[in-house]
Amino acid sequence: MKKKTAKAAGKGLRGRDFISMDDCSAGEIRSLFALASAMKSDRKKYRKALEGKMMALIFEKPSLRTRTTFTVGIKQLGGDSLLLTPADISLGKRESVYDVAKNLERMVDGIMIRTFGHEICTTMADHARVPVINGLTDHEHPCQAMADLLTVLEYKKNLRRLKLAYVGDGNNVAHSLMLACAKLGGTLFIGTPPGYRPEARVMERCKDLAAESGATIVWTADPAEAARGADVVYTDAWASMGQEEEAEVRRRIFSPYQVNRALFSLAKGDALFMHCLPAHRGEEVTDEIIDSPNSVVFTQAENRLHVQKAIMFELLRD
Ligand code: CP
Ligand code: NVA
């Protein structure tokens, strides 16, 4: 038995899940940006917006930004949160994902989950009657892409005329960024080693979305082709959480994709440097670039707070 009939009924985001960047239309994404900006500029106005609402925050991987911004965000809206770690619930081992979903839906108003397999997140969403938000899976990191594009809009105003470059691993962060750009328009070059391309089904989906939106999403193995003339150069860790054993091999394969002075100088003079963080300084990015005036990484991190407040409000409001 599932809730989320609101989607079919066209009643906006209320009661829905936020699992993938593909869960929202371009119009819904733009409305979330507008609300996030309003919340950013007038925090007090929304301090009772989710009064009495409780979010369960499930973390199966470490986190600084996601944990802090969801905890602080729901508090700033008048609600509260409860942290559930593997030591508490041992998801899928002590108890099935289904049973956890069926318990939590009776106790809380929304669930945020950071986990490994994307299907764990979708299973939770399929069975919980309350909204489920993806706080990162191996496949996607949609809250990150929302904060990223809000940041780009703050600095560059209009996405459509921009060239964005994502250089590094074709991972969860890349997937969500690609889907978001494909929905909203603009040009995104994804520069990865051939063996580390984004998933083919995400590329295919982006192609379809781009045909509607006018976006251009291009994959290349050449980091210089991606960075040349770019308005934004984005990178992420070469080895994501759960891939620690591959870190050594990946360091060798990804070294030509490091965002350093040589690569960044191919971009426009006023290009933004972006990174979802945590950064591995000296690997995917040099200190010189991440600490340069072009770097907006801490604004990205702050914007997680504002976009997630907007997302929680739209999903959880009465
Ligand atoms: N960018 C991001 O999600 O950071 P955390 O892993 O610290 O939450
Ligand atoms: N791709 C990284 C993102 C961390 C926020 C990971 O999954 O570890």
Image (cartoon, rainbow, N blue to C red):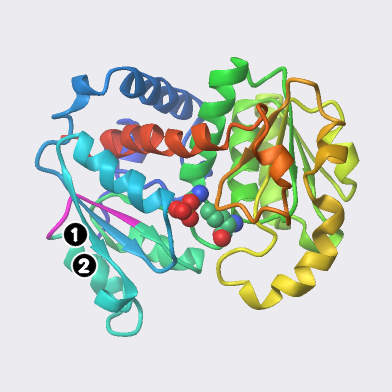
Return the x and y of residue 307 as percentages of the image width and height: 40, 33
- Up/down of 122 relative to 164, above or below: below
Q: Residue 38 vs residue 163: left or right?
A: left
Residue positioned most to the left? 52
Query: Mark 1 = which residue?
Result: 105
Badge 1 local density, few (<14 within 10 Å), some, or many (20+)?
Answer: some
Residue visible at 27% across and 81% down? 95
Return the x and y of residue 306 as percentages of the image width and height: 37, 32
Residue visible at 27% across and 56% down? 2
Residue positioned most to the bottom? 94
Distance between the Cα atoms at labels 1 and 2? 6 Å
Residue positioned most to the top? 157
Q: Amino acid at mark 2?
A: Lys
Q: Amino acid at mark 1?
A: Glu
Query: Mark 2 = which residue?
Result: 102
Return the x and y of residue 200 as percentages of the image width and height: 73, 56
Badge 2 local density, few (<14 within 10 Å), some, or many (20+)?
Answer: some
Residue visible at 62% across and 73% down? 244
Quadrant in which the N terminus is drawn? bottom left
What is the magenta range? 107-112
**Element type where label 2 sits in the image:** helix
